[in-house]
Structure formats: C-alpha cells, structure tokens
Amino acid sequence: MKRPKTAFFDFACCEGCQLQVANMGDTLLEVMGLIDLVEFREVMSEKWDGDLDIAVIEGSITDLHATERIKAIRKRSKVLIAYGSCATIGGVNGMKNSFDLDEVGDCVYGEGRWFFPTEQTRAIHQVVPVEYAVNGCPVYIPEFLSVLTAALQGIPYAVPDYAVCIECRMNENECLYDRGITCLGPVTRAGCNSWCVNNGNLCYGCRGMVSSPYVKGMKQVLEKHHVPIDFVVNKMDMYNKCRELDRNGR
Amino acid sequence: MGAERTKKDLNIRVDCLTRVEGHGTIVVDMKQGKLETCSLNVVESPRFFEALLRGRSVFEAQHITSRICGICACGHSLASIQAAEDALGLTPTAQTMRLRRLLLHLEILDSHILHIYLLVMPDLAGVKSFVPLIHTHNELVRRALRMKKACNNVMEVLVGRHVHPISLIVGGFTKLPQPQDLAMMHDVLTGLRPDMDATIELLSTLTFPDFERETEYVGLVSDDNEYPLLSGDIGSSDGVRMKKQDFQKATNEYIVPYSSAKHTKLSRDSFAVGSLARFNLNHAKLHPKASGAAAALNLKPKCANPFLNTLAQAVESVHCLEDAITIIEDLQSVGVNQDEQVVVGVNERMTLPVQAGEGVGAVEVPRGILYHHYQVDDSGTIEQANCVIPTNQNLSNIEQDMRALIPTVLHKSEEEITATLEMLVRAYDPCISCSTHLLDVRFMGR
C-alpha cells in the first residue's frame, strides 16, 4: 500500500502540540513507517506543494494571510485534522476576542501596531471544513494516535461527548468543588483521562465544552458552593471564547 | 577575491526558514558589493499575550503564559511564577526552589537535545532533516529520541508533562514526588549518562564554520558557586551588572517595521543571550563533568563564534544532567515534605496572602534570559504585563553576525551562502513561537 502523503502545518500557536510528536520516542519511527511525511517545518527543511492525503493543522486563524493559507491547504488536502486546542476551539488565542482589536495592538506594539494587522481569532472549522479533531492543550498523544489510525483507515473518530468528571471519578480523584476550588470538568469534553486533576490541578476546559452540557446540574453545583456564574464564564473564556462564533452561525 | 566578486550584487530571500520554532525570513540585498539590507524578519502572527493577561488573576498567569511556547513551557511558567510571587511578596520554600531548579535543568536538557540532534545535525550531515538520517544514522536518531523521551518521562513524573506543566503553580507544587518517584527519576537520569557521553564524543568529531565576531554576552550572574539559571542579577561581558528589577535598562526593547518580534540592545548595537553567553559568563561554576566536556570539545571562554552555541548547549546538557542527579540525591537523603503541597485555583479560598504590587521574573531558559513583569492590584488581578523573550534579545545580534559573515563567504555559491546563513540563524536556536514565530532567506538581485 502506498503510504499517505502527510504534512504538519502551524498557524498561531506555541508549537507544543507538534513537539508532542517528537516526544513520542521510538513510536515516532513506527508512525513514520506508516505515513510519507513530506512537510513539517519545525523539524524538516523538505517542502511539498502538491496534493496531500492528510494535513495536520496546529494553531488558530488570526489574520488575513492565515485565512488565505488555510484555504489553499484545504484545497489540496483530502483529509484535514485540527490538532490541539488552538485549532479545534481557538484556545487561548480566543481571549483576544474579548478586547477591541486596535486596543490590543496598541497595548503590545504601541505606535508600531499598524505593522501587525490582526483579526478576530477563529478555530480551523470556523474557516474551512475539518474531518477530524484532536482536542487538548497540549494534545494527548494516545488520542492523537487513535485519530491518526482512524484517518489512515478512512473511518470516523468520535471524540467522547461526556464530561471530564466521568474519567476523573474513574481515577478516584477527590472532587475539587469539595476542596473549595472551581473546576470546569463538569462541562468539558473527556478524552484526556482527567490529566490535570490527576496531577493536583483543576480542569481549565481546554478540550472544549460537551455538546449538551448538563446546565441544571452545573448550576446546582455552583449554587451549592457559592460560585458566581460570571466567575465560571470568565474561566471558560480562557480557552472557549471562540465558541461564540459557532453560536452566531458561521 | 577579484574586484568583480567584491562589487557583486547579492540577493537572498529565504521564506519560512525551517528547523526552527516559528516563522521567519532572511533577507539579504547587496548592490555593487554594498550590503543594503541584511535582516531576519519575524513573520509570525502576533498573539498579543501581554494584552490578554490584563484582567486575569495572577494565579492564572502561569497557565496562560506557558502557552506562549511549547518548547520552553516550563521556563515561561517559572518566570511567570517568579514574577507573580515577587509582586505578591511570597517567598518559596527551599524544597520548592530545589524542585523548580530540577525542572529547569530537565527542560534545558530536553531542549538542547532537540536542537543538537534534530535541528542542527542535519546541517552538519548535509541533509535536509532527520528523516534521511533514520536510514543512514539510525542509532543516532534512536539515541536522540531515547534521550528526549527520558527527559519527558522524568518531567511527567515531576509536573505531569513537559509541554504545559500541570503541577507547577504560584506558591509551590500541586503534587509532590513520592520516594518511588525519586527512585524512578534517578534511574532514568543515571541511565542517560552513556548517551550523554556518546553525544559529547560525536560532537567532538564535527567541524563548525570558523567565524568570530566580538560580542557582548548577557546572562544571569551571582556571587555564589551555583551556575545561575533560576536566580541572580543581570550581568554582561562588558561589565554591566544590575538587579533583575531593572531589566528594562538591560533590554531597551524597540520595534522594527519588518518584524513582529521586538529588538533589544544594551552597551552596543546588539548583545547575545543563551548557552554561549552563559558559558562565557559562568563557565567557572559548571559541574566538573561539564567542564571536562568543554575541554573535550575544545570550547574555551571567551568564545565569540556563534556557531559554537551548539557546543555550549552540549556542555550545559552535561551540567544539567549531573546537577539534576545531585538534586534528586539530595531530595532522597532529606526526604520530600508532602505537607508543602498546595492547591489554590485562582486563590478563591485566599489560601495565599495577596497584596498590590509589581514583580519581575528573570529565568535562564534554554535560549537565554526570559523576563516576565507584572503589575497586580490588591485583588491579585493583573493590570499590566510584559514578557521579554530571549530570541528577541538575539535578533539584532544575529543581524550583526550576518553582516560580518557575508563578506567572508562571498566567494561561495549563492546556495552555499544561503545554507551558511541559515546555519548561523539556527545556531542561535531561535524560538519564534516565543518571539512571536520566524525564518525564510531571501537573496535579492545578485
């Protein structure tokens, strides 16, 4: 079988999800045996401008140049994988959408801001159609391998659509609300094996919200622990601000 | 070199330089032998982190700023936490400082291995990436991946993961290593020693371009015997010394129109930070095994050949590995006090005291000094934030190096000149995601 031509591309991001690939160790060599890796700028000088079987996209779309670039990549790719929170939900780049864009430019570059035009942050699916999503900040490598396997076989991959709390319970973590800490696990998509809570921190919602969060239950939890709703929304906006663009009908 | 050669036109443009973190472009324009343009343009889309931090709790700053860069996520976290604690007036415990030093060592080691093997080695082997090396130098690629994986496994135990550490927060750690964790880390790191020896041996057989340019080197300095990475004053090889709070006088950031990364200068038109700068300033404080590695590599201070930054990284790798092992052994002998574990969220339970103030974090991350500077109000909300990234500090110096280098390589073909310029930029290990992203060489009208 011919190995599918695969490339990694990055937009506005920290490149940490690409780095996760280099952190796989020997597994990377096995993956390399299954795909024909033709472009991966972070670690390769090889370039490819022909058709692609699989394009893995890290990062969000934040300016006109990026919009044009992702559209061109889409045109020559059979399958597009949005890779990491910045790509799947806008991630931390979305926080910019809470501010006036000129004011944001002014704050960082002052008079020089006109050299750096910026637009509202968008997730990849808010600009072009996407076949697969690997959520997380950073991605969870076991999940990436599952998605890649599905993409190679041409079958769908279903991201878990239940809350992180399910996995968290399975891992026998003490509920953070009971420790007086606000956590976004109850409304965030599972699939990370409650990575952050296992390590003593809280869930920040980096994998995006479940498609139908149990609003009533969440409200009860917040009331019980006297957590104001604005406080939670502000926390949610750290990764999920771009969800507003979905709601408003893209 | 004949008159025609010296009067030639040279026009180089490398769009999207590869094997660096981020997007950058090299542009060289020489007309009649006169260098009109010579720049490294950062074309990364800016992400405006400094603006986004405003209005956020200072207890969230580490989580957010870690996302500036996936390569030095722990470094950003450590600088952020230091700035936050400085602003809040919190003093970390000795155990916390020890664990943070251990983490920083591991990140520097991991990052240097990535740079030496996967980003620089292809240049020295004359290939485009590590991919052809899988066939021609399989053991070498496997060693690189094995070393990276080892660092990652240890960081996973220490802070949950390397890319965006989980348990590292303002005030301490949300999870502390147990005796079995320390034993595992010790096993993995001591097991790395043969690979590290092989790395030094390999590098000692390689030849780097012969080029020198007298440069001002900047790094953390201190009066004690520790190789300063996590704390110290700002020092330079031109004799500057100042407190970290005065960092703005050391960086003097300014904007150039072609680059979304800001530039900096100190005593001269430019300065350099990073492994070579630290080696030049603090070589006497290296672990004896690292000094031995420097001797084996024939790296001597003060070294002004920027290409040898890669060797300085190798020397630091030995230092970080050996000192990490020492820290773990110290922790094993005194034990880890689990009572120091902290969970604060955004401090909604007021676990930690909060006050209005201003704070600076100055940490030596793999590519040089990283500064974070926050101003918070009495509720711990960030009013102003500023991050000064090592790669930005190096940009002007890289351009000055290119200006000095080009006349010495003019007799070569355009392809060779381009390759040499790319290698020079790559030697600095620029992180453009951080500086905002980097590299592409453009030659114009040769």
Image (cartoon, rainbow, N blue to C red):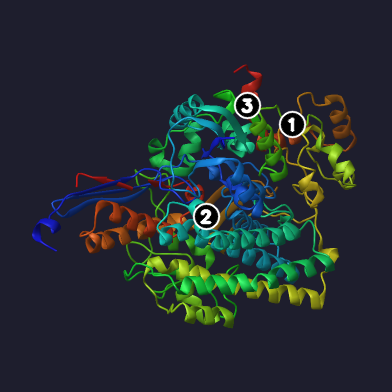
Residue picked out by circle 1? A159
A154 relative to B248, above or below: above
Looking at the image, residue B181 sits to the left or right of residue B378; the answer is: right
Query: Residue at left 64%, top 73%?
Result: B193
Distance Cα–Cα, label 1 vs label 3: 12 Å
* Residue B383 coordinates in the image, percent (x, y): 59, 46
Image check: A161 left or right of B439?
Answer: right
Q: Quadrant of the N terminus of chain B?
A: bottom left
| Residue placed most toward the observer, A111 or A247 | A247
Crowd band around label 1 with a 10 angstrom C-alpha radius: few (<14), some (14–19), many (20+):
some
Q: Amino acid at mark 2?
A: His
* Of marks 2 and 1, the one in the foreground: 2
Q: Which subunit holds the residue at mark 1?
A: A
Cα gap from disc 2 to disc 1, whole angstroms: 36 Å
Q: Pointer 2: what residue?
A: B135
Q: Residue at x 41, y 64 (%)?
A: B272
Residue B398: image x %, image y %?
Answer: 36, 58
Which residue lies under the disc numbered 3? A131
